[in-house]
Amino acid sequence: MARETRNSMTLAAAVAAALALGGCAGDLNPVRDVFVAVGAGAAPQQAPTFVEETRAGAPSGYVPVRPTPRRATDPKTPEEVAQARAALEADLEAVAQRGEQARGLAIGPDPAPVVVPPLPPLSEDPAPPPVSR
């Protein structure tokens, strides 16, 4: 019994997936066709005349993908590899030095301490005088 339920659920999932993916097809779209037949969807419209006139001839079948020609690349000699490695290491060192310089500028020296003048001494009677109205 459980096996039959699992098989029917698998079949239902496969049919749902086929219908969902069928909606992605260009000319063969069963989902769209069902909606158009029921009246819930709009029928496909013809392209305007200026679009039809400017389009190139319709390709018959599919347009083949042409592979790009392979570039002729010769392997580098050990000397060329050593030169490239040295250039990259020199660039790395220059970037590290610029980073240290920028870090030093960002941190900068300690700021000078702020000098605050001392407050005047309080009078003998710290309470303010009463307000008369």
Image: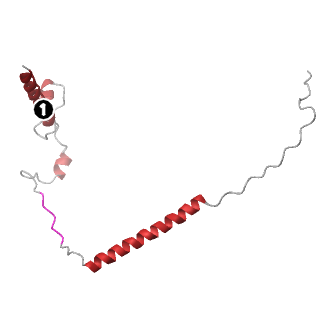
Say left or right for 54 vs 109: left
Residue visible at 6% across and 22% down in the picture:
4
On the image, numbered disc 1 is attached to which residue? Answer: 19
Q: What secondary structure predominates along the stretch shown in magenta?
A: loop
Looking at this view, is 12 or 3 the one in front?
A: 3
Asked if the magenta segment contains residue 69, the reply would be yes
Please name the residue shown 33% across and 77% down the image.
Answer: 83
Give neighbour class at mark 1: few <14, some 14-19, many 20+ (Cα, 10 Å). some
* Residue sitting at x 34%, y 73%: 85
Identify which residue, 111 or 54, lies in the foreground. 111
Please name the amino acid that badge 1 sits on: Leu
Image position of 124 (left or right of 108): right
Q: Position of residue 73 (x, y in %)?
A: 20, 73
Q: Secondary structure at mark 1?
A: helix
Residue nearest the observer in this picture, 26 or 47: 26
Question: Quick one: quadrant of the N terminus?
Answer: top left
Q: How many marks?
A: 1
Residue 86 vertical placement versus 112 (above, below): below
What is the magenta range?
A: 65-71
Q: Is residue 110 above or below residue 23?
A: below
The quadrant in which the C terminus is found is top right
- Name the colouring of the figure: secondary structure
Identify the residue at horizontal 9%, vertical 52% (top origin).
Answer: 62
Q: Is residue 39 magenta?
A: no
Splitting the image into 4 quarters, where does residue 124 fall?
A: top right
Can residue 61 be seen by looking at this rendering? yes
On the image, the x and y values in percent for residue 92 come to 41, 68
Is residue 33 visible to us here? no
Splitting the image into 4 quarters, where does residue 113 fall?
bottom right
